[in-house]
Amino acid sequence: MQASIDVVDLKKTYPRRGREPVRAVDGLSFTVKPGSIFGLLGPNGAGKTTTLRILTTLARPTGGTARVGGFDVARDPLRVRERIAVVIQESAAELFLTVRDNLTTFARFHGLRGEEIGRRADRVIAQLGLDAEVGRKVMDLSGGFRRRVQVAKVFMVETPVVFLDEFSTGMDPLLKRSVMGLLRESARGGRTIVLTTQILHEAEELCDDILIVNRGKEVARGDLHTLKLLASGVYEVAITFDRLPDGIEAELAARNPIRLRISGTTVEAAIKEPESRILALVSDLSRRAQVLRVEIGGASLEDVFVQLMDGENGGGQP
Amino acid sequence: MTAIGAVMYREGKIRATNLTFIFWDVVYPLGYLLVFGVGMSRAVGAALPGGLDYNAFFLGGVLGMASFGIAANTAWSFFMDRDNGIFYEMLTYPLSRSEYLIGKVLFNVLIASAQAAVTVLMARALLGVPVRFDLLPLLVAAVAVGTAGWFFFYAIFALRIRRNDAFNTVTSIFYFVFLFASSMFYPLEPLPAGFRQVAYANPITWQVDLLRYATVGAGDPSTLMLEALGFAAFTLVTFGGALWALYQE
């Protein structure tokens, strides 16, 4: 089966006056299968958005090749654009047009005509909960609704590939859940979804395949289970006490946790230690204060991410 | 053609959200002709070279000014689109960069043509300007190519300049230099030699001279032929420049 996206040794450098050029993308190679949800993750400045800009024909690569839907992004940008729908990172909407006109105008660019546009607009408006705002100009809507209109547009068309750059910015949790449902449904229908996000549990919930990048290079690649193996031996512990035991923060910090957060009387930590020592720690803490709730789980994608970035940055904070 | 049509549809939709804007677009050259033209006509009398009445002389100028203004406003819309984020999203739509530019300019050519039609008809009806209706195809061509040439010219700056205020300064300078160092408001023959040379090298002089010939039949055909070729070349070069600037985005 032909890959939906095929990237080979992709490079993008930006020249800087009097200084070394910036290597935003530095030899990335990956493929994305049709009908999959692919997550491109990394810290700020890792090269995610630049990679997406190249794949969506907004920027030309300095080296390597990238093909979307079988077409080279540099040689056949128009053929690529015919096959993609994009939600860029910045808010993007026709502010002077109504919500409905935003959707119908977008559909026209993708070659839709006549009653079909109206039918699709009705469906998408209902799916995205835009019924009450349909006749309002986008300039009069809140930031969250503007983002909703922007995301709604990709469901107006049936392009085989969708790119979403931080799509959930400004969305409330209910809408985010419903958009995630629509994205999963689209993928089941054969559409390829490529997304970048800083919200790792979003990627954990959605993505079949994840590529973690840093400084323009691949750091890790695989499905969620494969990536979690990279953090084997990492446990997430969350304990709520009636009162915080004395000195708990220093005690946990001494164990070099991957993450440590204390909020009120709840302690959350991701610790890389053998299972027996984790259980001993919980048992010890439970003798010093009353435990109201305890949860012990395996590593999350966030733990994997933090651990990988920590390694990349020589042990410092990412 | 589908892509160009979609860009035109979008431009039309945005313009239609403000009817006052459309109304002003269409009638402002006429207003200029009626206020400035009539005032100047009374002040300078009918003693222009060639015995041309000032209103007849100024009709071509006012049409040139209108297409220059529409072009500047349309180019400024790149800033608005960039601020709204829609500019970059549009660059991922299934249309080539040249279709994007052409679609944008074609809608404005329609507006400029409507504007020219209203202005010419009213100039004939209200001011008695002896309009040469037999030269109408030439008038349409001069308005269309003129609007396109100036739009592409301004687009280069709108796409390369990042700051709205900087672009506004540039357009103010262009308005001053291009409009006043040209044959738009006055005949060039009585002017000092240096001024005349600058005006003859100014593409708006070429366009206005063509518009003047296309409206009232004034001008020397051999000079006009050169000016027409010059303006066509100007339009092609600026189109190339605008396309280049768009590819840099």
Image: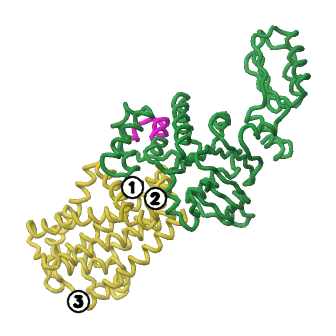
Chain colours: A green, B yellow
Measuring from the top left, give residue B120's x and y in whole percent.
16, 69
Badge 1 vs badge 2, beta-carbon distance below 8 Å = yes
As helix, strand or loop, the secondary structure at mark 2 comes to loop
Can residue B119 be seen?
Answer: yes
Q: Which residue is mark 2?
A: B94
Sequence order check, earlier mark of 2 and 3:
2
Task: Tell me the residue that label 3 is attached to.
Answer: B221
Q: Position of residue B50 (x, y in %)?
A: 16, 86
In the image, which disc is placed on residue A111?
Answer: 1
Q: Residue A223 vs residue B22: left or right?
A: right
Write the residue at 71% across / 57% down: A29
Q: Circle 1 — which element?
A: loop
Q: Which tag is nearer the camera, tag 1 or tag 2?
A: 1
Task: Please report the bounds of the magenta region as a residue range.
Answer: A138-149
Per the model, the C-alpha gap separating discs 1 and 2 is 9 Å
Judge depth for marks 2 and 3 and give the one in front. 2
Inspect the image, locate mark 2, and give the three-letter code of the amino acid beneath it: Pro
On screen, A139 above or below A30? Answer: above
Q: Chain of mark 3?
A: B
* Furthest residue toward front: A1
Tell me the crowding category of disc 2: few under 14, some 14 to 19, or many 20 or more residues within 10 angstroms, Cα based.
many
Query: How many marks overall?
Result: 3
